[in-house]
């Protein structure tokens, strides 16, 4: 087992371990307000990140940092972001800054499928438009299967 990272989030230290032998990566980080899990799909075609709970910008940055590390270590170029169970505590400015930061932190060849709840369709479209305008390859969906189908077609 290879220890990749240990971080303190809130009052808890969270360590992330890779089981590289089987390419299993269940990184689960929980705080009082939110949790996220990073894993691979069954066929190892993409990285899956599932986020739940109330989300603030500082937590977005933690999630994004962990995801960057996984993409770098395992040389993956496709990401499924499941935010369908997120209660966002972000302003429109935070949302836009999130996209601007993505442009600088992820290579342009990384494809991201963002899954939002049906109630957050407008948010998903806003993020998608801002992403495209900033050179980030991101598409929003309300259906997980559609997101996976699109993602698997990306280079």
Image: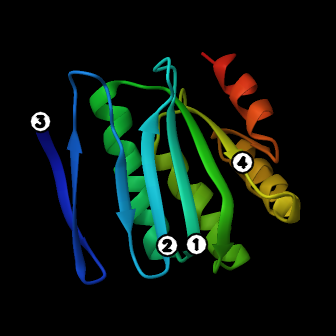
Q: Which mark is residue 53?
A: 1
Left or right, 42 with respect to 134, comes to left
Q: Residue at x 81, y 42 (%)?
A: 143
Q: Which residue is mark 4?
A: 115
Q: Residue at x 52, y 39 (%)?
A: 48
Question: Do the CB atoms of the residues marked 1 and 2 lie less than 8 Å apart?
Answer: yes
Q: CA distance from mark 1 to mark 2?
A: 4 Å
Question: Do the CB atoms of the residues marked 3 and 4 lie less than 8 Å apart?
Answer: no
Residue 121: x and y in percent read 86, 58
- Give whichever of 69, 12 is nearer the camera: 12
Question: In which quadrant of the rendered image does the N terminus lie?
Answer: top left
Sequence-earlier tag: 3 or 1: 3
Sequence-earlier tag: 1 or 2: 2
Left or right, 23 with respect to 64, comes to left
Sequence-earlier tag: 1 or 4: 1
Q: Which residue is mark 2?
A: 34
Query: Circle 2: is it few (<14), some (14-19), or many (20+) Cα within 10 Å?
Result: some
Q: CA distance from mark 3 to mark 2?
A: 26 Å
Residue 63: x and y in percent read 43, 58
Count of labels in the image: 4
Q: Nearer the viewer, mark 1 or mark 4?
A: 1
Q: CA distance from mark 3 to mark 4?
A: 31 Å
- Give whichever of 100, 45 is nearer the camera: 45
Q: Which residue is mark 3?
A: 1
- Up-down: is 153 above or below 41? above
Question: In which quadrant of the rendered image does the C terminus lie?
Answer: top right
Sequence-earlier tag: 3 or 4: 3
């Amino acid at each position: 087992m290879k220890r990749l990272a240990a971080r303190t989030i809130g009052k808890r230290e969270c360590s992330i371990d890779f089981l590289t032998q089987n390419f299993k990566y269940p990184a689960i980080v929980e705080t009082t307000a939110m949790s996220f899990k990073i894993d691979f799909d069954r066929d190892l075609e993409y990285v899956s990140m599932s986020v739940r709970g109330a989300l603030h910008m500082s937590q977005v940055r933690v999630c994004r940092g962990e995801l960057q590390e996984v993409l770098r270590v395992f040389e993956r170029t496709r990401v499924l972001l499941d935010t369908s169970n997120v209660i966002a505590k972000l302003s429109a400015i935070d949302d836009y800054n999130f996209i601007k930061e993505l442009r600088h932190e992820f290579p342009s060849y990384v494809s991201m499928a963002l899954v939002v709840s049906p109630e957050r369709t407008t948010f998903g479209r806003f993020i998608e438009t801002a992403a495209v305008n900033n050179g980030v390859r991101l598409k929003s969906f309300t259906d997980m299967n559609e997101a996976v189908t699109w993602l698997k077609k990306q280079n």
